[in-house]
Image (cartoon, rainbow, N blue to C red):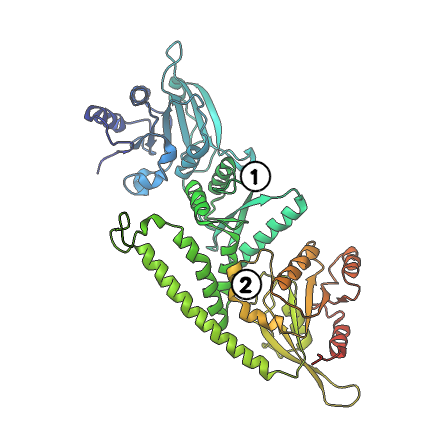
């Protein structure tokens, strides 16, 4: 196996130039620090002749492992291009770059490439010497999180010959491989990429909600990159500089996934992934993933799969329409059916089947509702994690182990659950009964494929005699969440009367109680977990007038 490899813009190199570069890459450098000055001067001559930057990767034994020809931003992950195993490289990789740029400090994508490699030191110097024969040079080390968003700090600046002999040990930064790829529990590390509005508090609440979604999906949010923009760039929504900042932040934090707070088109997602060099998911895909994890019943899994396929189909068709050249006439005769077309047809067939199954599910639920005619039906609706399931358990008083799952997380339950609630008739007649249904929680900007797929489940809400709109008064954003719930219900065409149920009164500030009374003077105040106000709520729901025929 060759000691070093030549990579990059090698096409078209003259054999004599290639031989000279190979001889330079075979020269040995000091083991622990610095570099061989004569080798770097020869490298500068070749860089000047080629009019390209040249970069050397040196291992801990002073052996050159890779010579990259051209800009580093086109190299991808250098660590994956080194020949041999990581054990052969040894600890303490060094990176040396001869650049034609006047600015020696690593910038942009080049700085990201350096972070991915994780060298203990990065020596950068100019192609040509200044007056007096000295090459200007700078020695850089990995920056710390206290120094802002730039990942490289200046260790020393001066003449190249001085820096080649300078011994700074392994540098202050972390060594290669020290950046964690995952948390100790094996959970994904997620960097959030957000667009903020002029309202700072609203932006912070939206970011907090996105963090909650990430945790509900089983991952850990490790950082946030936020940008306030008035004119969004159509190709990525975020400016080029902010995306580059996100790429650097992802390397520093060891993120394995980037999640955006805006829905992305296919080209926007690809543009972001190309710059970040990490998988990118948008908020809608994150919500769909949570639904896929939470779906427990066959009906729930059926509807989630349909929503996921509807979400993915247009994004699949956006990946290479130029490959689809079936048909007749000049310019339409391609090499045959592409894998893209096979995938599109397979997904389309699966969607057709799922739609038929969802139709059967709708018919089945319609028959169940027909069998419940004559019974009063109420539905608990509200923002996700507002306490609907806890309230259903508190009102129905199920036996141990039979209650609805109620956890402090977003979208803890998906499947509609109906419980029969009864109480003795004060007049001595037969017990009074009604049906109370807990439905899937709402959230702002709920993905349209999800709403469409879950319309069958949401019909339980649409046909209820009364809607109990539950809000969590302990959440500072409860007022905006209530507006979101009403907007979604209006969009679904719901005409059932609504009554505000203000939950968590034992944990909310007094101002929230006053605000809720202003929003709805007839609001009912409860605490599902503390048992406050439940008897008053039970009295109200049983004293409601029956549905008029």
> On the image, which quarter does residue 538 sit in?
bottom right
Report whether 63 appears left or right of 279.
Answer: left
* Residue beneath the point at 29% across and 20% down: 49
Q: Position of residue 534 (x, y in %)?
A: 74, 72
Q: Secondary structure at mark 2?
A: helix
Placement of 154 over or under 347, stated as above or below: above
Report whether 371 appears left or right of 350.
Answer: right
Of residues 216 and 283, which is closer to you in this image? 283
Name the residue tied to disc 2. 451
For the residues labelled 1 and 2, the Cα–Cα distance comes to: 29 Å
Q: Position of residue 182 (x, y in %)?
A: 46, 50
Q: Position of residue 393 (x, y in %)?
A: 65, 73
**Does residue 384 appear anywhere in the picture?**
no
Of residues 41 and 304, which is closer to you in this image? 304
> On the image, which quarter does residue 391 sit in?
bottom right
Of residues 401 and 127, which is closer to you in this image? 127
> On the image, which quarter does residue 229 sit in?
top right
- The outermost residue toward the left is 15
Q: Secondary structure at mark 1?
A: loop
Q: Which numbered marker is on residue 257?
A: none
Of residues 408 and 186, which is closer to you in this image? 408
- The outermost residue toward the top is 132
Q: What is the total number of numbered labels drawn onto the structure image?
A: 2
Placement of 234 over or under 127, stated as above or below: below
Q: Quadrant of the C terminus?
A: bottom right
* Residue beneath the point at 38% across and 50% down: 319
Mark earlier in primary sequence (1, 2): 1
* Residue beneath the point at 63% across and 46% down: 203
Placement of 188 over or under 357, stated as above or below: above
Q: Position of residue 295 (x, y in %)?
A: 50, 68
Name the residue tied to disc 1. 231
């Amino acid at each position: 196996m060759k000691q070093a490899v030549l990579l990059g813009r090698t096409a078209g190199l003259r054999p004599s130039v290639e031989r000279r570069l190979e001889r330079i890459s075979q020269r040995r450098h000091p083991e622990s620090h610095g570099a061989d000055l004569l080798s770097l001067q020869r490298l500068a001559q070749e860089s000047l002749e080629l009019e390209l930057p040249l970069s050397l990767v040196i291992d801990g034994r002073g052996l050159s492992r890779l010579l990259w020809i051209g800009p580093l931003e086109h190299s991808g992950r250098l660590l994956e291009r080194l020949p041999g195993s990581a054990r052969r490289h040894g600890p303490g990789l060094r990176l040396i770059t001869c650049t034609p740029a006047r600015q020696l400090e690593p910038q942009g994508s080049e700085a990201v490439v350096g972070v991915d490699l994780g060298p203990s030191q990065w020596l950068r110097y100019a192609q040509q010497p200044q007056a007096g024969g000295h090459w200007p040079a700078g020695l850089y080390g990995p920056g710390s999180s206290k120094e802002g968003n730039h990942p490289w700090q200046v260790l020393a600046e001066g003449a190249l010959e001085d820096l080649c002999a300078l011994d700074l040990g392994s540098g202050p930064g972390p060594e290669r491989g020290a950046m964690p790829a995952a948390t100790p529990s094996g959970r994904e590390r997620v960097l959030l990429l957000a667009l903020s509005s002029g309202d700072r508090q609203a932006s912070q609440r939206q970011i907090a909600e996105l963090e909650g979604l990430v945790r509900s999906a089983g991952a850990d949010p490790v950082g946030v990159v936020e940008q306030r923009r008035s004119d969004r760039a159509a190709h990525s929504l975020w400016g080029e500089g902010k995306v580059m900042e996100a790429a650097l932040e992802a390397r520093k934090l060891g993120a394995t996934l980037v999640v955006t707070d805006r829905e992305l088109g296919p080209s926007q997602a690809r543009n972001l992934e190309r710059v970040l060099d990490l998988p990118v998911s948008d908020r809608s895909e994150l919500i769909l993933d949570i639904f896929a994890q939470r779906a427990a019943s066959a009906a729930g899994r059926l509807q989630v799969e349909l929503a996921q396929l509807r979400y993915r189909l247009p994004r699949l068709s956006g990946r290479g329409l130029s490959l689809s050249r079936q048909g007749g006439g000049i310019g339409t005769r391609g090499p045959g059916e592409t894998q893209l077309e096979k995938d599109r047809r397979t997904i389309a067939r699966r969607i057709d089947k799922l739609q038929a199954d969802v139709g059967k599910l709708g018919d089945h639920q319609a028959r169940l509702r027909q069998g419940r005619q004559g019974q009063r039906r109420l539905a608990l609706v509200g923002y996700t994690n507002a306490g609907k399931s806890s309230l259903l358990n508190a009102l129905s008083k199920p036996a141990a182990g039979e209650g609805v799952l109620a956890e402090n997380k977003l979208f803890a339950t998906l499947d509609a659950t109906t419980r029969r609630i009864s109480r003795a008739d004060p007049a001595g007649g037969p017990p009074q009964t009604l049906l109370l249904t807990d439905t899937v929680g709402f959230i702002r900007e709920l993905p349209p494929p999800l709403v469409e797929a879950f319309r069958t489940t949401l019909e339980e809400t649409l046909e209820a005699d009364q809607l109990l709109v539950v809000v969590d008064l302990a959440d500072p954003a409860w007022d905006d969440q209530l507006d979101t719930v009403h907007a979604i219900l209006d969009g679904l065409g719901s005409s059932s009367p609504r009554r505000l149920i203000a939950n968590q009164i034992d944990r909310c500030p007094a101002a929230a109680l006053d605000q809720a009374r202003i929003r709805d003077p007839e609001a009912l105040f409860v605490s599902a977990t503390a048992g406050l106000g439940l008897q008053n709520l039970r009295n109200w729901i049983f004293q409601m007038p029956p549905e008029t025929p």
